Image (cartoon, helix red, strand yellow):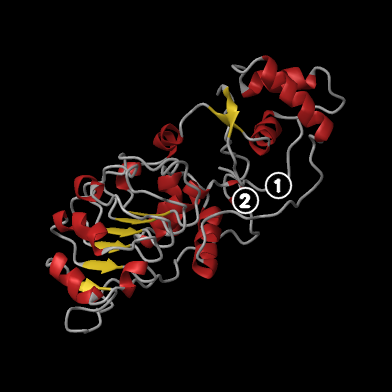
Amino acid sequence: MGKTSDLRDFERGMIVGARRAGSSISETAALLGFSRTTVSRVYREWCDKQKTSSQRQSCGRKQLVDERGRMRMERIVQANRRATNRQITAQYNSGAQNSISERTTRRSLSRMGYCSKRRANEEWKNIACVDTVRELVLDNCSSNEGKIEGLTAEFVNLEFLSLINVGLISVSNLPKLQKLKKLELSDNRISGGLDVLAEKLPNLTHLNLSGNKLKDISTLEPLKKLDSLKSLDLFNCEVTNLNNYRESVFKLLPQLTYLDGYDVEDREASDSDGEVDGDDDEEVDEDGKEEDGDEEEGVVGEEDEVSGDKEEEDLGIDDEDGM
């Protein structure tokens, strides 16, 4: 697989979710197809900074494909949008002074905004057992019209999902996850439309909507259908400023045990959901190198067609290979 800086936000979230679910470094690496070093670094970064998105700035050695080379590659892609990565590389090298590898072509296309036509969930089906994942952390990932790339109903055993600050304005495009119990949706822009939760997440017990745009008690009425809902958090929502807010919510949702961390008698919730992540008994390689370091998971595969549509991706820039 690629180096840590090349991982997509979704891939980082998969790693964090697996580690939070109790999988060891080796188990996570085997499950998702990454090296132990990559798993260790991503999870350590999440523990230190609480982020799964890559915000790495340009570094490393000079890029092999300069501005002029990118213009040449752009013309090749525009001339044949069904060209594979291998075909683009061969055509580029036929008239270039310095030859590049397919790996470099793949990275260059990614930085230019091109992506493979393979859908993200199809890629993950090939490299990860999504039906074994129980926790998934996708905080700070970007959403597109309420959809998170790669998040599908194939996560049939998912129990914990965190989508903090991903730009959601609605929950209507969340996949159907029958076993999901805990959903973190804080710091988004959700203002209503909660009626779909009962249909898609029927076994939800914990829901965090803190920092959203909920203004009226009536917007919470659809949560009555969530019979298993025990804990609801609405910190920093305008609805909390209403008179008799707590009394009104407990009356509307009699199944609730805790609202904003306290029960109806103002007793604080116990920390039974807290998790302690111990150190793994396995260490990274002494020289700091990744196992399987030569393998690379590219956005555009060797035989994948290149999509003419561009999408933003923060992949960072890393050392590149020549032929």
Query: Which residue appears at 63% of the width and 54% of the height?
Result: 289
Quick check: can you spot residue 9? yes
Q: Which residue is mark 1?
A: 318
- Looking at numbered disc 2 in the image, what kind of residue is underneath it? Ser
37 or 48, which is in the foreground? 48
Reply above or below: 22 against 100: below
- Quarter of the figure with residue 137: bottom left
Q: Which residue is label 2 attached to?
A: 5
Q: Is residue 11 above or below residue 282?
A: above
Where 122 falls versus 35 (above or below)? above
Q: Is residue 300 above or below residue 274?
A: above
Contact, mark 1 vs mark 2 (Cβ under 8 Å): yes
Give how far across and how far down residue 24 sits, in percent: 40, 59
Residues 303 and 141: in front is: 141
Residue 78 appears left or right of 311: right
**Mark pair 1, 2: CA separation:** 7 Å
- Say if residue 253 shows up in the picture: no
Give the residue displayed 24% in from the left and 64% down from the top.
217
Q: Quadrant of residue 70?
A: top right
In which quadrant of the rendered image does the N terminus lie?
top right
Badge 1 amino acid: Asp
Q: Quick one: which residue is furthest to the right in this view?
A: 97
Please state, as top left, top right, bottom left or bottom right, where the C terminus lies in the image: top right
Q: Position of residue 240 (x, y in %)?
A: 32, 72
Badge 1: residue crowd in 10 Å (few <14, some 14–19, many ≥20):
some
Q: Position of residue 259 (x, y in %)?
A: 24, 73
State the count of labels: 2
What residue lies at 42% left-to-right and 56% top-to-bottom? 189
Percent position of residue 278, x then y: 41, 71
Describe the element under mark 2 as helix, strand or loop: helix
